[in-house]
Image (cartoon, coloured by chain):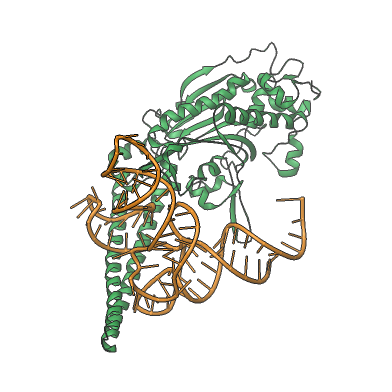
Chain colours: A green, B orange
Amino acid sequence: MHDARLLLELGDEAVRRLDRRGYKLDLAGLEAMSSRRASAIGRVDELRAESKRAAAEVGKAAKSGASSEEVDALKERARELKERIREAEDEVEAAEAALRDLLLVIPNLPADDAPDGDSEDDAVEVRRVGEPPAFGFTPRDHVDLGEAMGILDFGRAAKLSGARFSIARGPGAALERAIASFFLALHTGRHGYTEFSPPYLVTGQTMTGTGQLPKFEEDLFRTGTGDRDLYLIPTAEVPLTALHADEILPAETLPLAYTSWTPCFRSEAGSYGRDTRGILRLHQFSKVELVRICAAEESRRELEVMLGHAETCLQELGLAYRVIRLAAGDMGFNAQLTYDIEVWLPSQDTYREISSCSDCGTFQARRSGIRSKDAHGGRGQVATLNGSGLPIGRTMAAILEQCQEQDGSVTLPEVLAPYAGFRRILADGTTE
RNA sequence: GGAGGAUUGGCCGAGCGGCCUAAGGCGCACGAUUGGAAAUCGUGUUGGGGCAACACCCCUCACGGGUUCGAAUCCCGUAUCCUCCGCCA
């Protein structure tokens, strides 16, 4: 969420930057709403001050032995004031709601070095790392491989839950666990992240703080019991970022670096027919997420740091990938700059998104009330960043496809062996 | 699901209708003192908002309502925590 005043100070600059992501900012409307709120608050404050004085006069008069008529007259005046306060308060509430409703749906300002455009095709490639493997045969996709080995079962998943679910079995399930354990060990051990095991169900307020609500409710699964309403997290970014909502963090503790392996639930509304095959796009998948909270002015540097941590995952696994910088109009609502990491998928003969690392600047922090304070009491703004490091399913798909051999077996990246307990999965699903 | 109890500023803790602009203590910050420190003394110290303004004003004693001229204080509701009973992985 933006600060109305800052947005107005930026003025035409804000209009220009938001226009790059296709949002038309009505500066005059914002200005009007903002000053309507300010003058409404001013009026209420004045009336309240008067009301306090009036109440004090009643007490003074009663104590000094004034006649009851005099006291009653004073009370009557105080009562009238209270009526006027009530009316003025209604106006404040209406003015604040109007302003807040507008501010909540204005997306973050894209950074100037996010390329122009509004689609994946407008992204700029930053670098390629690793060589896509050359096969002396036609590589199979992860669905063929996984089903043949008996480690993935889409038919039974559909029986249980319908479309867009998967079941991992035997070495497949073990491989998921191994990948997640490897990532967590890497981030907590070498990259300095603190691991969390947070709730997977959160309140609407939490979802609003991180920006999923009110605009993107249709992307979420919603549940509840009795009169309690909860949402299933679409990513651990939500609970990890919200951990410090409405808190003032000691500046010397920054940057905070948090990680968590959680299931993620997404309705995938609007993606009908896309990636229907395999484990690339599911209603439920699991992911190791990275979140960093830092001083506002550090966010850009922190983004590069976090991107490096996500890339390390792929480098350690020996998977070929590339990094792209997303176009201004293609980034998520919260982001001011986003790098995507795309892993090579032989079956599709292309790079496919496996991680999204975003600098949200102060946008999310302001929205969820995260601030900082230095040793001298000086208050500061903080920035939030989040990135996948990495999703388990897509990583597994990339491993199966990039590490497959002609006989239908898959040789795991060496780093996974200690976690999986095996080095190869043979065509018949046995391991060695 | 049921019965009790609790919730005050960074922390502890007073307060039970107007003098709460929240006592006192701890912690912290700044200053004095000192060769330097400890101790001591002094000053400051919740967080938001209106405003050009560190002036002034408003809000904030878990949260939301209500009673009253006036609420930390009285009433109702909600949340969270604690104790006990029931059920349960």
* In the image, residue A321 above or below residue B55: above
Based on the displayed image, in which of its 4 quarters is residue A40 positioned? bottom left
Indicate the quadrant containing the C terminus of chain A: top left, top right, bottom left or bottom right. Answer: top right
Residue depicted at x 63% and y 27%: A395
Image-quadrant location for residue A424: top right
Image x and y of residue A188, in percent: 58, 31
A189 lies left or right of A95: right
> Does residue A413 show up?
no
Task: Name which residue lies at 39% across and 37% down.
Answer: A296
* Image coordinates for residue A183, horizontal then vertical, percent: 62, 29
Residue drawn at 46 percent across, 35 percent down: A255
The one of A420 and A212 positioned closer to us in this rendering: A420
Task: Count the marks.
Answer: 0
Percent across and percent down for residue A354 are 57, 28
Compared with residue A71, is residue A240 higher up or lower down, i.e. above or below?
above
From the viewer's perspective, is residue A80 above or below residue A23? below
Determine the image quadrant of residue A174.
Answer: top right
Q: Quadrant of the N terminus of chain A?
A: top left
Is A131 on the left-hand or right-hand side of A74?
A: right
* Residue A137 in view (yes/no): yes
As drawn, A306 above or below A105: above
At x 71% / y 44%, what residue is drawn?
A: A161
- x, y percentage for residue A398? 64, 24
